Image (cartoon, coloured by chain):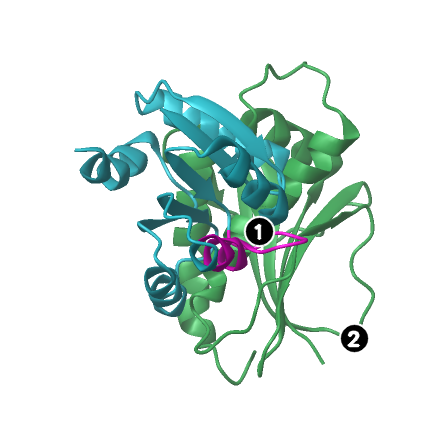
Amino acid sequence: MRVVVADDSRVMRQIVIRTLRQAGYDWDITEASDGAESLQLAKDLDPDLVLSDWNMPEMTGIEMLRAMRASGMDIPLGFVTSEGSPEMRDQADEAGALFLIAKPFTADTFRDTIDPFLA
Amino acid sequence: MSASIDMGVFAETVFAIADEVFSAMIDGEPGGLIPAFEPFEVPADATYAWVDVHGDHPGRVLLATEHETAMLLTRALLAMDDDEPVSDADFVDAFGEIANVVGGNIKSLVPDPGPLTLPQVSPLPPTDQAELLHDAQFIWRGRPLAISLWSLP
């Protein structure tokens, strides 16, 4: 399974990737450092899943998701973000996100949230 | 922010938030972070990390600790050995992300908050005319660490 992990923090990308492995997901992962790079990778790689931070420079995660959907890309996307307010969850849902995982997270959080979408 | 957040709730909740962040991301188990029994002053050799919340009630969440403690936090976050070298970029990135995650969770206590800024890290505290609302003091691995909430003009 090919996955793009987008976060402007290299440290956080490492932690997300480490936690995915701890959760048992042996995925082919490509990293993106902002929403614009992630959007381009989505076009180029046609990944099976995008895991994205929300608050990033250049293009935010929600802007990237809306741009993907506006251009006809239906690649599944989940947010992994430090904010998980009901308003943001509503925005994510309306834009077509699969889920929103609020930081901090654990391997159990990833499994509990992501597994239902892999079935 | 002071008009929109209950300081009693904040004082009770900030430890729960910080404990969850440290347990999940830094220590891998609960109990690494405890409330300070005695008040302390932020040391001269300190590092600061903060995020601001824009909107009708602008505020700031500020972390302050000794530089060496911030380095240990960085290594713990990156699952590095305690004596492993840390690049400046990783240090700023990691310590800023701790502020970002703590701040993002504290932001959830504010009704109708605006956007969260990207984190900033500095050896000096921010210099604008912010008003201190609450200073929560902790001990992590025997070292002092403060998380404070500020109201911005």
Q: Secondary structure at mark 2?
A: loop
- Please identify the quarter of the rendering in which residue B11 is found: bottom left
Residue A59 located within the stretch drawn in magenta: yes
Q: Residue at x 78, y 75 (%)?
A: B129
Q: Residue at x 49, y 35 (%)?
A: A5
Instruction: Tell me if label 2 and label 1 are in contact, CB under 8 Å.
Output: no
Q: In this rendering, do the residues under marks 2 and 1 share a single chain? A: yes
Q: Is residue B148 above or below residue A111?
A: below
| First to last magenta residue range | A54-68
Q: CA distance from mark 2 to mark 1?
A: 21 Å
Subunit of mark 1? B
**x, y (%) of residue B28?**
40, 28
Q: Which residue is mark 1?
A: B100
Q: Is residue B117 left or right of residue A5?
A: right
Give the mark, 2 or 1, whose residue is nearer the N terminus. Answer: 1
**x, y (%) of residue A55?**
57, 55
Residue B126 located within the stretch drawn in magenta: no
Residue closest to the eye, A32 or A68: A68
Q: Amino acid at mark 1?
A: Asn
The colour applied to the residues of chain B in this rendering is green
**x, y (%) of residue A14?**
54, 28
Q: Is residue B147 above or below residue A113?
A: below
Q: Which residue is mark 2?
A: B129
Identify the image quadrant of the N terminus of chain A.
top left
Q: Secondary structure at mark 1?
A: helix
Residue at the outermost front position: A72
The colour applied to the residues of chain A in this rendering is cyan
**x, y (%) of residue A80?**
43, 45
Subunit of mark 2? B
Q: Amino acid at mark 2?
A: Gln
Front position among marks 2 and 1? 1
Q: Is residue A99 left or right of residue B78?
A: left
